Image: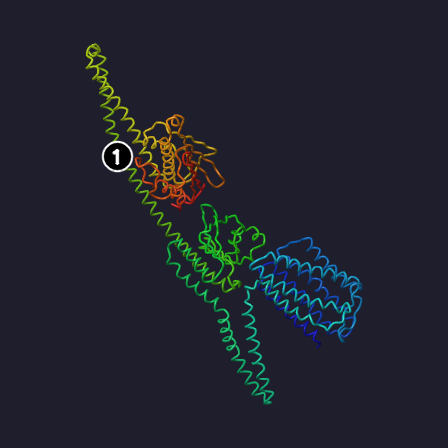
Amino acid sequence: MSYFAIESFVLGFACAILTVIIFYNRTRFLHTVWALFNISVGFWAFGALIVTLCKDPYSALMTWRITEIGVAFLAVFFFHVTCELCELYPKKLLTAAYAQAIVFSILSLTSNNFFSGTKIVYGSIYYAVPGLYFYAFFVIWMALVGLSQYFLFTTYIKSQGFQQKQLLYFIAATVAGFSGGATNFFPHFGLKIVYPIGNTTIILYCVIVTYAILKYHLLDLKVAVTRVGIFLTLYALVLGIPFYVGFKTDSWIWSTTFAVCLATLGPLIYRSLRLKAEDLLLSEQRRYQKILIQAASGMTKEHNLERLLELIVRIVKKAVKMEYAAIFLEDNGIEAYRLRAVRSDTPLEGEIIFKYSDPLIQFMKIHKEPFLFEEIPPEIRKSMNFPLNISLFVPSFYDDSSIGFMMLGNKLNKKAYSIDDINVFKILSRQTSMSIENCIFVEEFKKAQERVFAAEKLASIGGLAEGVAHQINNRLNHFSMVSGELKFEVDSFLESHANLVEQNPELKKTFEYFIKISESLISNVKRTDGIVKGILNYAKVEAKETLYSNFFLQEVIDLSLDLLRIKHGIQDFPLELDKQSSDLIFGVKSQIMESVYNLLDNAYEATLDKINILTSEEISRYIPKINVSVSQKPERCVIQFSDNGIGIKQADQHKIFAPFFTTKASSKSGAGIGMYVVKRMVEENHKGKIWFESEYGKGTTVTVELPKKYSAGGI
């Protein structure tokens, strides 16, 4: 048997094995096309083997005609694989490529203008003589291969991370394989070369490229080579020693005895050597896998969600030594998954969320197991907007409900995630899901207890306020009755004894004083009654409105104005309300009212403070103005509080939200916690935003943004 025949057999056998491996591990259409490529290469290889066995030119010619079908589709499948790998989809060009392969396959079988006959090369092999059609076929075949290489090279330049490494394998292998495989055309054209020098590289090409295409995380090349090396060495000895003993001793008994003993011990020795070799090669990988498993078992002891999330990303990043680890948790309030914890060498800015409708989230809910970035369909990968390179997704599900997911970056040593890594992250995902759910339950329970306590406290305050108001109203009614009776008696006496009063000036002055006192009593009784009603209304709101709801801003402003008029002893408050759209807002009514009250109170006192720095002429022209405007955005409501008061000095602006800091004069009330409380209510409880712009001497504008919907879990 010639070297060409042996080489063809080995190539065909290798392609058959690779085809089985690919079909067994395929997860994408790319793998299917690559399996077809291997089939076409194997088809040509076994055809070439049969040619070497042909004894007459006719059978050799017919074999070449059939074998050339594999060659025709070999270039097309390679081009298709390249397009899939580079995420290029030239549909018309692919259609034309398949069409020409079909046409030339038919011509190869039927036309003498494709192969006109055979000739003997290298002493014994009948090689096909090309016709006119074959030259056209060769040009198109080389063009497809060259275009594929061009696509690979340009994509490699633009790519990075995992894809770049995969393409590097692919380019190196294709250069080696096609440069050697193309030498099979030379004998057709009568070129005299030492044959077949380059044909051997096809075998190496198939192995390397298949390894890259199957995303080398499925197979650790060092481990695979070590296993094969141990196996071949060991079984060479197992089979070789009995033959050697039999040859030397000329005794089949000794030969059989050695064969039985070595065949029995061989698997045990192989297993022991393989495990020791893998322990040595995978020591680093198994070290961090052990750390992750131990960490997973200890996470249930942590009951604070923020600390748990920070602990997870810190352990994962440090143990595996990766670029970053990030955790996203479900947020029902905004119907999205929000970034809650990240450990990264590259800082992330701004809020990062993935909406429920995001294609990535839909893909994750279908594939609930950890998956690599390369396993995501290209159209989803292109739609993603995440600032860091992504390598692995680890979804977290609890009772079939999605809690969130973890994003992992590339390993710092540039190695891919192996199957063992993915299995460890499956365990970690299940354990963290339970731990996160446990933390959420504990926090919800604490918040529920706090809400119950707050509701009970507010209810008792409301009840106390009603009781006090009842007692005060009883006294007010008595004062009102007495003052009314007094005024009635005085009026009655003056009417009955008008002449007597007119003749006695002192008596007239006394009765006028009584009338003034009675009117003052009646006026103050009415005013006090208004104060009591205002306080009672505020207490009732605090007691009832402790949950999230939709309500109108006007309601909150009206209640706040009642108290502000009482506090400052004024009848008219200088307020203008500008409703650019609906003033419907979403939140806890009592907390929003307290925030609005504080902001309006600060604005009014700022207008009073400004009067102190104005000249008499400026005071006569100064008109205090407070403006509240409300506008609606797609997901948020924006409320602005503007005044033309004294403003805030530049040196004090960074301290406005700090507790116990105040810019008010010492003669005025204020402990300096109003703005601090407002900020916490808006940002922590309602997940909104608050900021201000101010210029000293001109005024201040405070802007509050509130989400249109947010889960009550924030309170």
Of helix, strand and loop, which one carries label 1?
A: helix
The residue depicted at 48 percent of the width and 71 percent of the height is 279
Q: Nearer the viewer, residue 299 or 386?
A: 386
Q: Is residue 480 above or below residue 260?
A: above
Q: Is residue 402 left or right of residue 52?
A: left
Quarter holding the C terminus? top left
**Crowd class of label 1 (few under 14; some 14 to 19; many from 20; radius 10 Å):** some
Q: Is residue 286 above or below residue 639?
A: below
Whether residue 35 sits left or right of residue 274 in the image: it is right
Give the amino acid type for the residue marked by disc 1 in the picture: Val
Residue 271 versus residue 545 in the image, above or below: below
Q: Residue at x 25, y 31 (%)?
A: 472
Instruction: Give the side of residue 282 with respect to residue 137, left or right.
Output: left
Residue 621: x and y in percent read 40, 26
Expressed as whole percent of the image width and height from the top left, the position of residue 579 reads 46, 32
Residue 189: quarter of image: bottom right
Give the residue pinned by disc 1: 468
Foreground pick, 165 / 82: 165
In this rendering, does residue 506 appear at all? yes
Residue 272 image offset from top left, x and y in percent: 49, 76
Q: Quadrant of the N terminus?
A: bottom right
The one nearer the camera, 655 or 487, is 655
- Name the residue nearer the viewer: 309 or 427: 309
Q: Quadrant of residue 252?
A: bottom right
Instruction: Tell me if residue 559 can be seen.
Output: no
Residue 696 screen position, x and y as percent: 41, 36
